[in-house]
Amino acid sequence: MITYCARFIQDLATLTAPLRKLTKKDIKYEWKESQQRAFDTLQEKLNEKTTLPYFDPSNDTKLIVDASPTGLAAILIQNTPSQNDETVVAYGSRALTEVEQRYSQTEREALAIVFGCEHFRLFLYGIHFTIYTDHKPLVSIFQNPNSHCPARLERWRLRLQSYNFQIHYRPGHDNPSDYMSRHPMNTTSMTSQDSENSEYYIQFIAESTTPKAMTLQQIREATQNDPTLQHAAHIIQKKLMAYLLRNIKDELTVSNDKNIILRDTRIVIPKSLRADAVRLAHVGHQGIVKTKSLMREKVWFPLIDSFVKSAIDSCIPCHATGRPKPPQPLLMREIPKENFDTVYIDFLGPLSSGETLFVLIDGRSRYPVTKIMKKTDAPHLIPYIDEIFATFGLPKKVISDNGPPFQSKEIKRFMDDNGIQHKTITPLWPQANESETFMKPLTKAIRTAHLQKQNWRRTMQEFLLNYRATPHTTTQVAPATLMFGRNTRTRLPQTDTKTDNNALDHSVEQRDKEQRQRMKEYADRRRQSKTTTMNIGDYVLVRQQKHNKFTPNFDPKPLRIITVKGTMITAERPGFAITRNQSFFKPIKTTGLSSEDEEEMEDSDEHEEQRGRQ
């Protein structure tokens, strides 16, 4: 109730301060005299007769704004001709965020102007009004379009271009919004009024962009201006022979004025209206078959099926909401020639203890190494990596994901100092990291330990002992045997056997290749994968995160591919670039781009050419 009546109660932020204090985190709930007094005062305010008048667009309108180190305030005032006096229409205030509190005073005062205009935008749109501020530099900044100001202020000036106002200076002691800015209301994400206005705006845009019905008068005028249909109408009326109409001549009829042609009961659409006809039939975005069926039922023109297919193939919303394309066939990675030549690293966690596991997997033997870490930043990670490398030697290549620790300057310097090639996988494509396969059984072992109320650290060590001694699915050799050239002793009894390392190396490579090929064929067949070629310059849509069941599968804003490295593709549009695996992208036809999209892509091409020349 108080929030609903907020604009009718002056100094509401001050009145509710004792009550709002009880809602803060880590504050003990104690109802004292100040809270009771505030509660009683608010009840009285709700029963008082308000003095706020209705807003009258014909009256002179003023907006008084102010900013303090903690909040913003704005008062909407009008001059009533009958009383020749200023009357308050509404109050508004909000608290500054922690970031906004670090703004300079000029920026805070400018933000108060932006807040006031947007808070009362329903009253201020389309009228001329006056803004009063107690910060004099803002007068010259906002009144002079040629003035140079910081980027933040420049952006705010652009946001206010839709308002018609003048700014005047009023000293602080004459500014009634000064007190409200020092005692602001808590910031809310969106009021119910804002949400309702947004819904009205969306409905207006949807209605204004929906194709209108095609009238018979439009068809008459377009047919009259279509030389091909006029020639056909002449042939039909005069019953002349025509090679192009030989198969359908008996089905065609024409009106006396030659402005309407029918094939049976279907209207023949002139060339200039065919795109509109397909667009009307495609309202609701039915598929190609359904749209063809609807078109054939109502209208006709030559090559109607091809025209419909081409139009729907170019429909960006259909691509964005349609099914993802079949996945790409799996790529086979060759096994490294030597142990510890290539290693994969990743993190698992955080665990229930707040710690994180650092995991390293050898690309040849699949031998895993784990370290328990309290912090995952580079200064804490490097000593653990250094310890592992001191035991097994320096690898030639380290492969990781794109996590912050692996992207740090310290890690890059460490790898460069040791002559190690550090390679990151494609973002959001964990399949490229061999360590992900090991994470599943390791996670299961730790979960089982928690379920059985056992020491998970001890359970993890027992799991590692057995995992290292168990023949790997791909190589058919235990990771420890392949790493150290001998069998590792476990709690199970075993005979003493010697290992022929030379024969073992050859058989491992052969078995790894054969097993990977079988796994690839099975996975490709199960996923119904299909090879899709994408080249530099192609237009694509990128798969996006779904927030609910109605979120489109793909971002409807087209991108152009700029680099292709195997299955890793980088695409961009003006102001945005993204790198993902090829499976994240969906090719589209350039004919589906709107004029705005084409202009953006042309600007992007010019930017690329300039960057290339530089």
Image (tube, rainbow, N blue to C red):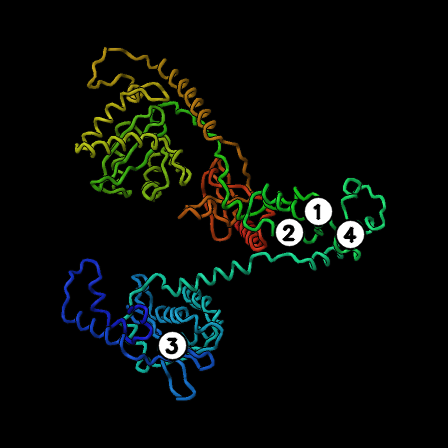
Choose top left, top right, bottom left or bottom right for residue 455: top left
Q: Which residue is mark 1?
A: 301
Q: Which amino acid, by three-letter code, is at mark 2?
A: Ala
Q: Secondary structure at mark 1?
A: loop
State yes or no: discs 3 and 4 in contact (Cβ < 8 Å): no
Q: Earlier in the sequence, mark 4 or mark 2?
A: 4
Residue 283 as seen in the image, left or right of residue 466: right
Q: Secondary structure at mark 2?
A: helix
Q: Earlier in the sequence, mark 1 or mark 3?
A: 3
Residue 168: where, in percent of width, then height? Answer: 41, 80
Viewer-nearest of discs 4 and 2: 4
Query: In front here: 614 or 496?
Result: 496
State yes or no: discs 1 and 3 in contact (Cβ < 8 Å): no
Residue 76 has which mark? 3
State yes or no: discs 4 and 2 in contact (Cβ < 8 Å): no
Q: Which amino acid, by three-letter code, is at mark 1?
A: Phe
- Number of other residues with Cα within 10 Å of mark 2, as a class: few under 14, some 14 to 19, many 20 or more: some
Cα–Cα span, label 2 and label 1: 11 Å
Cα–Cα span, label 4 and label 2: 20 Å
Cα–Cα span, label 1 and label 4: 14 Å
State yes or no: discs 2 and 1 in contact (Cβ < 8 Å): yes
